[in-house]
Image (cartoon, grey):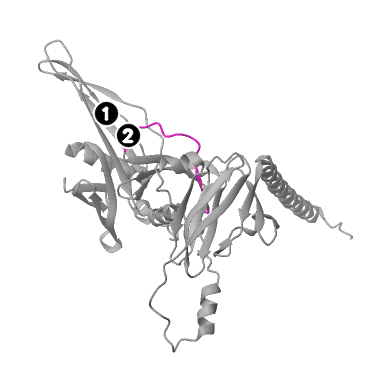
Amino acid sequence: MYKKKNNAPLYITIAVVVLVLAGMAAATYIKKGREKAVQEAQAQAAEEIPMHDVLLYKTNAASIEFEKEWLKSDNDTESVLRIQEDTLVTLIVTPKEGYYLEQADIVDYDFHEVNNFLRETSTEAIRVNFVMPDTDIIINFDFAKMEENEEKIPETENAADAETEQTTEVSEPESPYGLTLHGVTADVILSFNGQFDDREFLQQLGDALHIDSARSEYREVTDVTFSSEAYEGEQESDKVYHYIYFNEDPAWRLLATYYLKEDTYLFTELVEEMETETQAQDFSQGSGAYNTGQSSYGNSYSGGSTGGYGNGSVQTVTTTTAFDIMQVSTTFLAYVGGKEAFYQKAFEYVLSSGLTGNIIGTMSSYEILPEEQKAEFKITLNTGGSIKGTYSKANGKLQFSGL
């Protein structure tokens, strides 16, 4: 007796495979479409930024290096560069033996000076930095001859080798941590009172965030941008405040505080604030209120408290405590229950100790002891004290001491 074979399962399998392949093809098409759209948008945005010419006069007293992509035309006496407006321009000037760079004259065609700053490198080269203005400019370098050195080259030295050494061009090492800096405007440079050094800024940023560490949450940062948003918080006259953000994402940002006297930076993580909670308490002589203030989760906390007393009247005394913790390991945070829990408990301990003002802590050491199910750590404070703490994995509790 002939029995008809049921091919339904085969057809269903084929249909499923076809649908999966179609879905994958569609996803790939959509992804490529989005990538193309992003590239086109970036190209369009780049085209919208005005370009201006730089007339760079050549000199026999030095070699001058710049980005090859800027070169528009070149001859024996001058180079013409084409650079986007608001670009932080770096020229590497290497004086030949017997000469030194006195100054860089950078002006527009109305002879208005363009602010610039010179920085020495680890070699004899000089970095000349300025922000490309919204007009064509002219650059001319002024060199002077050094006084003759009475010390002669030893006779045993090969003269040909000496000549080669004198004429060899020296290129500056790549940017610290491979970072690219954006958004450095003339206003940004002026705010640093002539002390801004782009390489030193990136070096300190990379050091503070441990960008070269596989455990750092900033390890994928490639681009750093000075935000156009002005800092409107409390400011001190000997400090400079700027928001910066990473990888073209304005939401991923920090506050960079520059200490003019110490020539150092402090980078503070920005976080959302939680709403203020108010609790009422009864006092034996009248009425009063306790305000928990505002606290933030992350590397930056602020808080305040008010107390009232009197016979039928209320007198308010306000104190403010700001507490920042720097260089906290993400591995440590994961072990102790997360960033929010750790920072909040640390902040509460600082408040309970009675400390007020702007307090900055640095996690100077930590140790995870898996066999004992605990972690130990130490936070050094800018006030001179320190906080010692332990975390118990068994009960999930943090304990602090030292204040």
Residue at 26% across / 30% down in the picture?
304
Q: Residue at label 1?
A: 292
Residue 232 located within the stretch drawn in magenta? yes
- Find out whether the residues at labels 2 and 1 contact each other: C-beta distance under 8 Å: yes
Name the element at disc 2: loop
Q: Is residue 347 left or right of residue 268?
A: left
Main SS category, magenta section: loop
Q: Is residue 41 left or right of residue 361?
A: right
Residue 24's spot in the image, x, y percent? Answer: 72, 52
Residue 282's spot in the image, x, y percent? Answer: 16, 18
Q: Is residue 180 left or right of residue 333?
A: right
Residue 296's spot in the image, x, y percent? Answer: 35, 36
Number of other residues with Cα within 10 Å of mark 1, as a class: few under 14, some 14 to 19, many 20 or more:
some
Q: Residue 131 is drawn in which quadrant?
A: top right
Which disc is residue 295 wearing? Answer: 2
Q: Nearer the viewer, residue 292 or 40?
A: 40
